[in-house]
Image (cartoon, rainbow, N blue to C red):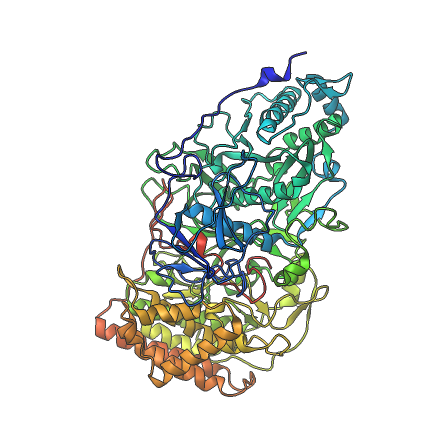
Amino acid sequence: MPDLRDLRCITATTATAPSGGGGGAPGTFYDNCHVTLNPVSQFRLTMPTKKRSAPDSQAQSLGVSKSLRSNNTSPHGSIAADPDPPRLPSDSPTKQGSASASKNNQGYSLQKDGKSSKNRSQSKLSSSHALSITSDNAKQETILYLLKSELNGAVFHQPNFVDALLPCSDEYLEQILRRCAGFDVERNKWTQPPPTGSEDNFYRPIVDIFNAIGLAVRSTTLDPSPYAQFQDRNDRPLTSCYPGMSVYPDIIRCERPDTPDNVHWQDIDMFVEVKNKKKLMKDAIRQSARYARALFAHRIDRRFIRTLVVCGTTAVFLHFDRSGVIYSDNIDMYGDPRRFIRAFAGLLLLRGADAGYNPIFTNTWRTPNPENPKAPILAHTVTINNEKYTVVDVLCIRKSVRGRATLVLALRNVKRPPGDKTIDGVLKVTWRDQSRFREGLILREFVGTYGVCQMMYDEVVNINGNTDVVCSRSGLSPGPLGEVFGPPEENPDMKGARRDDCRVHNMLLMQPGRPLSEAKSPFELLAGFVGALMGHWAFVNKQVQHRDISANNILLTLGDYKYERLEWEQLKERGVDVLVQEFQVPEWDKIFNESGDHKYEKVKELTWKFIRRLDFLKQVIKVLGPKPFGFLSDVDMANILTLSRKDVTDMHTHRTGTLAFMSHKLLLAEQGDCVPHEYLHDLESFFWVLLYTVAEHMEGKNLAKKASDVISKLDLLDPMLLGNMKLSLLTQIADGSLDARSFNTTWSKMLAPILKEFAEWTLGVMKHKFDSTKDPDSHFEKLLTIFLDAAIKVRSESNTKETQATHICSSTDECTSCPLRDTRKEGEEPKISRSSKGSSDLP
C-alpha cells in the first residue's frame, strides 16, 4: 500500500517582509496610513483623501455606539473612531500580520500576532508613539466586527449534515476506501499517526489526507480532468480585489490545477481553516466566516459555500449561505476515519450547482496583468431568458455572508459586433426574504411609465427544476456552537432580521442608468429629478409606496434606451380623458398570490384618487421633451399600501430607507409611535438627495467647510439626533441663514434658489397633520412646478442643450470609471443603513 507521504507536493515559497518593514506580515507593504494611540482613548486612522460617494441604503449598519467613525469628522479627511470603539472578542482568531486594538490599563495597544508564535506579546504604546499598519489590517478588524453583527443568532446545528448535504453512497464509499492512499481498510485507520504540537505540524498531514481522498474520488468517478490539489497556504496571503481580504487561509484548493503561485481569491474553490486544539473550534468557525465573506465577494457565481474546519483531529463541516451558517456534528478524522472519509468524499463529489455555483454564469480565465495583480482574473458570461450577455462591470456587490447579497452587473449582449460598447441592461441578483414584495412583479405594472425604471426580464431562479432557496433551518437548533458570534441578547439590532430562513434567489434585468453625480449640467440634474418625481407619482397612483428614495435610486437615463408601450405616446394618440377613464389600480392581491409567494390579503381601501398626473405629464413633455431624463429605480423596499402578509408579522418599522435621505419626521418618531410611512415623507427625501448631491459635487477640489459640514451632519447614525439636525437644516435653508451658495461646489450657485424653495415647501406641508384624502395631486403638482421652473431658468442661464448621454464601457477590463458604478469603498460600509435596526441588506 502506498504511503501517505508519497503524495506530498511541496510547492510553497516563503515571502519576505520588505527591508526595514518591522514586524509586519511577510510580503506586506505598508500603505500611507498611521494609527496614533494615547492614554485618553483616542484612536485615529489617517488615510489619503478620496472622493466621497453617496451614502448607500444597502450598506451594513453598526448603530451609533458601534460606529467606527466619529459623526463629527469630515469624510474627506481623517477618520476618527468613538472614544470607546467596537472591539472584537478577546478570543477572536488572528492571522499573520493582523492587528487588533485592545484596551488595558495602559490605554489602547496594538497586538501583532503571528500564527506560529507560541506566546502573544503586547506592545504598549504611549501617546508619543505611532505604529504604521496596513490599511488591510484596519479593514480586517472592521470585517470581523461586521461578521459578528451579521451572523449573531444565525448559526444552526444540523445533526444529519452529512447525509443531507454531503451524500456519498455505500458503493462509492467502498471503492474510495480501497483507493485511498495511506488508509488501512482492514484496520480502519490511517497508516500515519495523528499530528501533535504546534499548529504548523498539522498542515501537511491534513493536506495529505485531503489529497489522498481527493485522488480516490477522482479515480472512482473516472474524472478525466487534471486533479487540483489541496495546498498548504498558511504563510502566503491570497490576492484580493478589496481591502481587508488579503488573508491567509490555511489550506486551499483552486478551481484550476495550473493556478499560478500568486493565487487570487477568484481562483479559490475551497478553503479550510486549521487549529491545533479542539477547544479553538469557535475561533476556526469565525475565521472561516471571514473567508466565506471574501469568497462570496470575489466569486459572483457562488450561491453557497460548503467547507470544513479541523481543530486537532476533530472536523466540523460548514454550510454558508445567505441565511447564515449550518454546522455538522464533530467527526474525528483519526478516531472515526471511515465516517470522515464518507463526509469529505461527499463534499468532493458535489459538482456545479450542487457545489454552490450559479449555472447562469460561464467563466473564462484572463491572462493575469503583472502591472495590476489585484485585477479580476475571471471574465463572466451570463445566460438570461436564453440570451447571452457579457458581464462588462460589477456595479455593486454587497460584501457579506448573510442578507440579500445584492449583486448588480452591467451587461452587453454577445451578439453585438466587436467595438460596439453599448450597455444593454443591468442585472440585479438578490436573495429576497419572502416577506418582501417581489420587485419584478411590481415593475411589470409600470412598463412604459414615464420616470419609472423599466423591467426587461424577471425570474425566480430555478436549479434542477426547483426554486432556488437557502437551506432550510426548519427544526434546527443553535446547538453547542450556536453562540460562536455571541449570545443573541448581545446584538439587539438584529432581532427583526432573524426570521430569514426562507430566502429565494431572484434575477431582475432592467434599464441601465447613470448616477446623479454624472449629470453633465444643473439642467440635466433637475430634469432627472423631474423624471423621478413623475415616477414616484405613478407608483403612489397605483398604491405602491417606494420607501427608499436615495441618491442611488434616482438615476439619469441613457439616450439610446428603447422603451416599450410608451405612456407618453399613448397620451399623444389617445388623450388624457380616455387614459384617465381607463385607469385601473392593479389587482395586487391576485398578482402576488398567483406568483407562488406567501399569501397576501387586502387590509384597506384607499380613499384618494389621483386624476391629474397625466394632465401634468403633458406640461413636462412640453418643457423637457418626450423621453424622461431620469427615473426612479429599486422598489426592493416598497410596500403595497393595500396588502398584508397573512402568515408573518411585518418586519419593517416606520423607519425604512436610507437614514441620510429619510424624512425628519420618521427619524424623530419613537419606536412605539404610530407614524406610517406616507408618500409625503418620500417627497421630503427628494430634498435630502438634492441637498446631498449639490453639497458633494465638486470637480477636482476638496470640499469647502460648509459643504463638508452638511454632508457630515447627514451621515449621523443616531435617528433622533439626525432628525433634529435635519429639521435645523431645513429651517436654516428656508430662512436664508444657510445659503447653499456658500458650499462653493460645482452646482451650488445655480441650484441654491431651488434648495431654498424646496425647504420652504417641505416645512410648509410638514407643519400640518397629513391627510391623504385631501387632494394629494396638489403636492406633486406644486413640487414638480418648482423643479420645472428651475430647470427652465437654469437652461436659459447656461444655454444648455437638451441631450441625454449614451454610455459605453470597456469590454476587456473592469471599468473603474464606469458612470454606472457604485463607487462606495469597502471601508465606507458601516456609514448608512436603511433603518435604525441592523443591516439594511439583511431583510
> In the depicted view, which residue is nearer to us: 198 or 385?
198
Residue 39 in the image: above or below residue 656: above
Q: Is residue 395 visible?
A: yes
Name the image quarter holding residue 202: top right
The C terminus lies in which quarter of the figure? bottom right
Q: Quadrant of residue 128?
A: bottom left
Q: Is residue 330 above or below residue 14?
A: below
- Residue 710 rendering spot, x and y as whole percentages: 38, 71
Q: How many marks?
A: 0
Residue 549 visible to an observer of this rendering: no
Q: Where is residue 69? Give x, y as percent.
A: 45, 61
In the foreground, 622 or 87: 87
Left/right of residue 518 with respect to residue 68 in the rendered view: left
Q: Tell me: 342 left or right of 831.
A: right
Viewer-proximal residue, 692 or 196? 196
x 46%, y 46%: residue: 137
Residue 246: percent from the left, percent from the top?
Answer: 46, 41
- Where residue 469 appears, as percent x and y from the top left, is 65, 49
Q: Is residue 775 left or right of residue 646?
A: left
Q: Horizontally, is 588 left or right of 815 in the view?
A: right
Place residue 575 in its image quadrant: bottom left
Query: Which residue is at a point 60% across and 82% down the rendered structure image?
Result: 607
- Judge by depth and name the residue closer to the eye, 593 or 189: 189
User: The N terminus lies in which quarter of the figure?
Assistant: top right
Q: Is residue 194 above or below residue 243?
A: above
